[in-house]
Image (cartoon, rainbow, N blue to C red):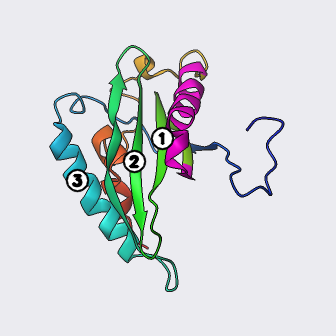
């Protein structure tokens, strides 16, 4: 977050950073997925995740991708913007995400529930962080050893669409 951001302000935002260390996440099938296939899988996963929420949490749905998930094969990263609708709220919000793949997992950068007027800022922020991130020598995506490394139980398609999360036991 920027040093001048007042976190108590109504329009404050920040980038969450998570590390997934569940094994190698393959991107082999990602490029062959159509926009429609990704969107349909993501909408179904979002419905499932919304239904699994605690009582009292507002239901939500994926409207679409204002910015499609795009793979940067050279940087082994993907970034996108999802438009989210919450029940009872007239205005939709955006979730921006970028993923940087490594040898044993991934770094996930996300901004949630940002106003649509900040779409470009949102996307550029997560994309910049993913693009500037680097794994230590021997831990990059290209360093994978098929014989020695554990493989994650999902691939990049499952991670981007959320289908991996929707199938996890609660």
Q: Are marks 1 and 2 in contact (CB under 8 Å)?
A: yes
Q: Is 121 placed above or below 20 here?
A: above
Which residue position holds label 1?
97
Tell me where residue 128 sits by quadrant. Answer: top right
Q: Position of residue 40 (x, y in %)?
A: 20, 53
Q: Is residue 117 left or right of residue 148?
A: right
Q: Label 1, secondary structure: give it.
A: strand
Based on the displayed image, in which of its 4 quarters is residue 59 positioned? bottom left
Q: Is residue 101 above or below residue 1?
A: above
Question: Magenta part mainly helix, strand or loop?
Answer: helix
Q: Is residue 20 above or below residue 165?
A: above
Tell me which residue sits at (38%, 23%) in the image.
145
How far apart marks 1 and 2 lie (CA) works out to 8 Å
The kind of secondary structure element at disc 2 is strand
Q: Which residues are magenta?
A: 112-132
Q: Nearer the viewer, residue 51 or 112?
A: 112
Is residue 97 in view? yes
Callout 1–callout 3 Cβ contact below 8 Å: no
**Badge 1 or badge 2: first in the primary sequence:** 2
Q: Which residue is mark 3?
A: 41
Magenta highlight on residue 48: no
Q: Residues within 10 Å of mark 2 (few under 14, many from 20)?
A: many
Residue pointed to by mark 2: 82
Q: Which mark is residue 165?
A: none
């Amino acid at each position: 977050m920027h040093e001048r951001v007042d976190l108590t302000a109504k329009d404050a935002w920040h980038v969450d950073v998570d590390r997934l260390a569940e094994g190698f996440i393959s991107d082999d099938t990602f490029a062959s997925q159509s926009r429609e296939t990704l969107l349909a899988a993501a909408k179904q996963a979002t419905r499932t995740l919304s239904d699994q929420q605690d009582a009292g949490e507002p239901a939500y749905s994926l409207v679409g991708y204002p910015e499609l998930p795009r793979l940067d094969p050279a940087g082994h990263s993907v970034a996108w913007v999802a438009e989210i609708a919450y029940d009872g709220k007239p205005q939709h919000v955006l979730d921006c995400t970028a993923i940087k793949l490594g040898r044993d997992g991934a770094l996930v950068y996300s901004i949630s529930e940002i106003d649509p007027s900040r779409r470009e800022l949102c996307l550029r922020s997560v994309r910049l962080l993913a693009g500037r991130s680097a794994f230590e020598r021997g831990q990059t995506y290209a360093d994978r050893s098929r014989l020695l490394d554990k493989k994650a139980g999902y691939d990049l398609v499952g991670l981007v669409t959320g289908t991996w999360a929707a199938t996890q036991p609660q």
